[in-house]
Image (cartoon, rainbow, N blue to C red):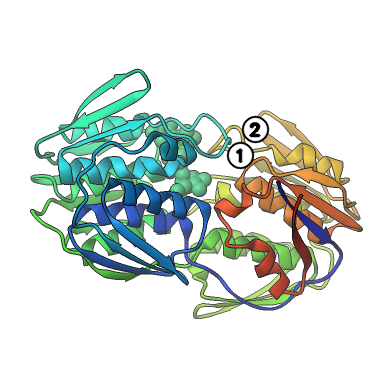
């Protein structure tokens, strides 16, 4: 079991290049199934979930390599339509393979997906979306099989702008006959990145980034070379870490326009943030001020994936803040752990009421999921004394060796294998 040891209280300083976005790279790797041939994809982070995706692609018949952020992928020999159960169970994002495999091979079988323990995480919108494109769906004994000789374009309204469902439908619809319109589509930057990747392959998609995406089906796609966008959640995590520790850091390879909601809120707390092209400079001098109300919501709203880290930031701010979580119901697991470090947080009806305290105290805490785990690392950086964060494998799902990134910013953090 690996654990982080953190000696807190040191302001972060220095410069760090942010790695590529996990949530953009995962659907892009799955989308490569749609064409036959050799892909080169850059800025793919070295993370557990990416490793699982590459292993699944290998088991489906592709050849893959991943070296210093560059993935080489030959999809010519993909012929297997059953996503391996053990790998499916390890990562929810395996569901991204439903759309592409169905579109390329006319059939796909999956077992119900696994993943982070942050709520129910249904897949009904993925299923109804693929069914609207003409796929037949059979479910028995925990397996779901989709079949369609050729998918047919349709108008699909999503009752919630699900990121994954929007992406799965896009990937299925690119090779469908006719036009598909996704209404109430998710608008996340990772969806724009997927559109750009697919269009580079020869797809005809427009509208990603807005709530209506239109896809004119084409007969064939071709392999491409592509670079993934920077990870806005990793950027936001370091931004908050600098604010929390009264640090002064520079982040490169960022897209500040993807973090407008976060940047405005953190600036309103008194943290100085300057942006110049892909560079962000974050400087904090004094104790931050509280924020009256934050509501997590689909993009461009405040991201649920930064809710836990924001809560830590506010746990030391002056005054009382409120965060309402509306995207995932199970996403306050960090609260009990933060309370053990001296934070004063009360949760009621999906809202957390955070009364800022003067200091946090290091102790042993447990990462329960990816972002909750990152939040505990931030708490450790700001706490007095030593913090031990257990179960760091959750954090490794979304941050490429976070301890090395933070060491580069001067933090006193190390990984222990106990
Ligand atoms: C993606 C991100 C994840 C982020 C989330 C919300 C990836 C790989 N993961 O997850 O980091 O936290 O967006 O920004 O990109 N829902 C349904 N039915 C469905 C699908 C979703 O009811 O078929 C609900 C979910 O239960 C949840 C909400 O929609 O309450 C948001 O889920 P969704 O946008 O689909 O998130 P993911 O794509 O799973």
Q: Which residue is mark 2?
A: 350
Q: Earlier in the sequence, mark 1 or mark 2?
A: 1
Left or right of 382 on screen, residue 263: left
- SS assignment at label 2: loop
Q: Position of residue 335 (x, y in %)?
A: 75, 39
Q: Which mark is residue 12?
A: none
Residue sitting nearer the eye, 358 or 175: 175
Kindly tell me whether residue 173 is visible in this rendering. Answer: yes
- Residue at left 47%, top 61%? 21
Q: Quadrant of ligand 1?
A: top left
Packing grade of label 2 (10 A; few <14, some 14-19, many >=20) is some
Q: Position of residue 359 (x, y in %)?
A: 90, 55
Any atom of ligand 1 within 8 Å of the CB at mark 1? no
Q: Position of residue 84 (x, y in %)?
A: 36, 38
The correct choice, above or below, for 70 with respect to 22 in the image is below
Kindly tell me whether residue 180 is visible in this rendering. Answer: no
Left or right of 327 on screen, residue 88: left
- Residue at left 57%, top 49%? 305
Q: Which residue is mark 1?
A: 325
Left or right of 338 on screen, residue 272: left
Q: Are marks 1 and 2 in contact (CB under 8 Å)?
A: yes
Q: Quadrant of residue 102?
A: top left
Q: Quadrant of residue 222?
A: bottom left
Left or right of 46 on screen, residue 156: left
- Residue at left 61%, top 64%? 263
- SS assignment at label 1: loop
């Amino acid at each position: 079991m690996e654990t982080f040891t953190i000696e807190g209280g040191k302001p972060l300083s220095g410069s760090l290049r942010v790695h590529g976005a996990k949530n953009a790279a995962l659907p892009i790797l799955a989308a490569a199934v749609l064409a036959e041939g050799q892909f080169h994809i850059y800025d793919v982070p070295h993370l557990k979930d990416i490793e699982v995706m590459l292993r699944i692609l290998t088991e489906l018949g592709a050849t893959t390599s991943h070296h210093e952020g560059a993935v080489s992928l030959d999809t010519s020999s993909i012929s297997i339509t059953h996503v391996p159960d053990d790998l499916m169970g390890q990562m929810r994002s395996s569901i991204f393979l439903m759309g592409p495999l169905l579109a390329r091979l006319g059939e796909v079988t999956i077992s119900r997906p696994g993943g982070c323990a942050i709520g129910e995480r249904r897949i009904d919108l993925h299923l109804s979306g693929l069914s609207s494109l003409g796929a037949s769906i059979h479910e028995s004994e925990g397996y779901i099989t989709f079949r369609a000789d050729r998918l047919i374009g349709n108008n699909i309204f999503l009752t919630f702008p699900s990121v994954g469902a929007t992406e799965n439908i896009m990937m299925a619809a690119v090779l469908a006959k006719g036009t598909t319109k996704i209404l109430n589509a998710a608008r996340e930057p990772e969806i724009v990145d997927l559109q750009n990747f697919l269009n580079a392959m020869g797809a005809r998609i427009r509208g990603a980034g807005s709530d209506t995406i239109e896809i004119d089906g084409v007969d064939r796609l071709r392999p491409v070379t592509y670079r993934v966008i920077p990870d806005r959640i990793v950027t936001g995590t370091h931004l908050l870490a600098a604010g929390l520790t009264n640090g002064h850091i520079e982040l490169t390879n960022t897209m500040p326009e993807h973090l407008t909601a976060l940047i405005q809120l953190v600036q309103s707390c008194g943290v100085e943030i300057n942006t110049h092209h892909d560079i962000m400079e974050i400087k904090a001098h004094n104790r931050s001020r509280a924020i009256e109300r934050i509501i997590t919501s689909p993009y461009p709203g405040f991201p649920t994936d930064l809710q836990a880290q924001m809560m830590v930031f506010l746990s030391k701010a002056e005054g009382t803040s409120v965060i309402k979580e509306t995207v995932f119901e199970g996403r306050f697991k960090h609260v009990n752990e933060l309370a053990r470090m001296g934070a004063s947080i009360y949760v009621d009806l999906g809202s957390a009421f955070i009364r800022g305290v003067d200091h946090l105290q290091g102790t042993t805490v447990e990462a329960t999921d990816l972002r909750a785990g990152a939040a505990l690392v931030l708490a450790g950086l700001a706490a007095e004394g030593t913090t031990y964060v257990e179960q760091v494998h959750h954090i490794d799902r979304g941050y490429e060796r976070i301890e090395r990134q933070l060491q580069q910013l001067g933090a006193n953090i190390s990984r222990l294998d106990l």
